[in-house]
């Protein structure tokens, strides 16, 4: 899966977390992806920059890494202020603050976490939870059944 695939799916943004323009991030529900454009092997750190006590063992991170994968995480945004609020909470978590966002926390154990980019897709009338699962399933189809690096579950299919 490539950046072009995400663009073809309708994703927008493709900007660093620390450069998210508040006025441009949608407040509607949707999904988002964290991407890493570098093809260099990652350097993992422990603990990471995420909230204290939230890190994974290095071996688990190494086992979850998929060389060559651009997409590291898919998330969903169903909160009051939609994608904007969810990305803000994710960024706060990565800066060591309590935020109510603990999914995808392995991201913050990458030495180059601050260089990662995020993109988003407003899901309109589609359920963000179902869309997140669809994206994870599409990733798994292209990567031998493996989830994106920071996704620990397949997501929910909606009525589960």
Image (cartoon, rainbow, N blue to C red):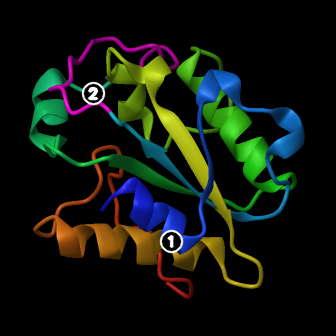
* In magenta segment, residue 5: no
Name the one closer to the observer, 40 or 94: 40
Q: Is residue 109 above or below residue 116?
A: above
Using the rendered view, name the quadrant where residue 18 is placed.
Answer: top right
At horizontal 43% and vertical 78% (from top left) the residue drawn is 134
Q: Which residues are magenta?
A: 38-53
**Which residue is labeled 2 in the image?**
56
Residue 8: mark: 1
Q: Is residue 81 above or below residue 10?
A: above
At horizontal 18% and vertical 61% (from top left) the residue drawn is 146
Name the one closer to the observer, 144 or 2: 2
Q: Is residue 149 above or below residue 2?
A: above
Q: Kindly report the secondary structure that dominates the magenta region of the rendered protein.
A: loop
Residues at marks 1 and 2, CA–CA distance in whole angstroms = 33 Å
- Residue 2: percent from the left, percent from the top? 34, 58
At horizontal 31% and vertical 47% (from top left) the residue drawn is 70
Using the rendered view, name the quadrant where residue 133 is placed.
Answer: bottom left
């Amino acid at each position: 899966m490539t950046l072009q695939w995400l663009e073809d799916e309708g994703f927008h943004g493709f900007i660093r977390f620390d450069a998210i323009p508040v006025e441009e991030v949608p407040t509607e529900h949707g999904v988002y992806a964290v991407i890493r454009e570098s093809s260099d092997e990652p350097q993992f750190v422990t603990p990471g920059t995420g909230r204290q006590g939230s890190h994974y063992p290095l071996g688990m991170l190494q086992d979850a890494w998929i060389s060559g994968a651009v997409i590291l995480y898919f998330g969903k945004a169903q909160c009051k202020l939609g994608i904007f609020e969810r990305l803000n909470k994710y960024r706060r978590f990565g800066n060591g603050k309590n935020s109510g966002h603990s999914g995808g926390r392995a991201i913050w154990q990458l030495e180059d976490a601050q260089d990662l980019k995020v993109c988003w897709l407003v899901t309109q009338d589609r359920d963000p939870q179902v869309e997140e699962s669809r994206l994870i399933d599409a990733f798994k189809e292209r990567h031998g059944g493996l989830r994106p690096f920071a996704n620990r579950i397949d997501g929910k299919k909606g009525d589960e």
